[in-house]
């Protein structure tokens, strides 16, 4: 019984932590698309972490995320994932390390890109902007420079 209560307490603490991050991100970035996108990705990453709970991410796919309702409803469009800018979101095991996973976000506008990146600078262990690997922590000015397309593609590595 104490093991069950301990596990429940652990998940409650994790959920409170994710909720706090979402609340902070919402207040820091407003209720626009950037703030909503930050909240969406925060919820998604929290749910993935809770589901896999230290296990390798070898089976992680968009199908698992959609079927398991790991993403907020605003991100789920039928059997696919989309972001607030209408871009495809792809969740997959990291190709070189099964203890990590990647979230690719397409169609991120230049004016939102650096703010979006900044919200996950400390949580991500890797970042690619438009295919170019970035050194973390990424300086905000360098993020603005790298987000030079009208529609940018970001790949965050978590784990």
Image (tube, grey):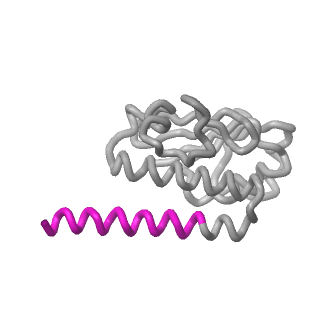
* Residue 8 falls within the magenta-colored stretch: yes
Q: Position of residue 44 (x, y in %)?
A: 52, 49
Pick the residue in front: 125 or 66.
Answer: 66
Q: Position of residue 151 (x, y in %)?
A: 81, 36
Q: Position of residue 47 (x, y in %)?
A: 45, 51
Q: How many marks?
A: 0
Residue at point 35% right, 62% down? 11
Residue at point 47% right, 43% down? 69
Q: Is residue 98 above or below residue 158?
A: above
**Which segment is the magenta one?**
1-22
Residue at point 80% right, 51% down? 112
Q: Position of residue 8 (x, y in %)?
A: 28, 64
Task: Residue lying at the far left in this picture: please name it.
Answer: 1
Q: Main secondary structure of the magenta part?
A: helix
Quarter holding the N terminus? bottom left
Q: Is residue 76 above or below residue 42?
A: above
User: Is there any visible trace of residue 57 in the rendered image?
Assistant: yes
User: Is there any visible trace of residue 132 in the rendered image?
Assistant: no
Classify residue 119 as left or right of residue 149. left
* Residue 146 falls within the magenta-colored stretch: no
- The quarter of the picture where residue 121 lies is bottom right
Residue at point 32% right, 44% down? 55
Pick the residue in front: 116 or 138.
Answer: 116
């Amino acid at each position: 019984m104490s093991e069950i209560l301990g596990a429940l307490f652990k998940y409650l603490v994790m959920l409170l932590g994710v909720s706090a991050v979402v609340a902070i991100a919402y207040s820091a970035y407003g209720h626009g698309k950037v703030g909503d996108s930050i909240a969406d990705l925060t919820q998604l990453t929290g749910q993935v972490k809770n589901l896999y709970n230290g296990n390798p991410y070898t089976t992680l796919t968009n199908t698992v995320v959609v079927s398991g309702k790991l993403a907020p409803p605003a991100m789920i469009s039928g059997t696919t994932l989309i972001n607030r800018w209408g871009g495809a979101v792809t969740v997959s095991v990291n190709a070189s390390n099964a203890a990590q996973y990647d979230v690719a976000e397409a169609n991120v506008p230049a004016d939102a890109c650096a703010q979006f990146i900044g919200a996950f600078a400390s949580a991500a262990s890797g970042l690619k902007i438009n295919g170019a690997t970035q050194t973390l922590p990424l300086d905000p000015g360098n993020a603005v420079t790298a987000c030079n397309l009208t529609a940018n593609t970001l790949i965050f590595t978590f784990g």
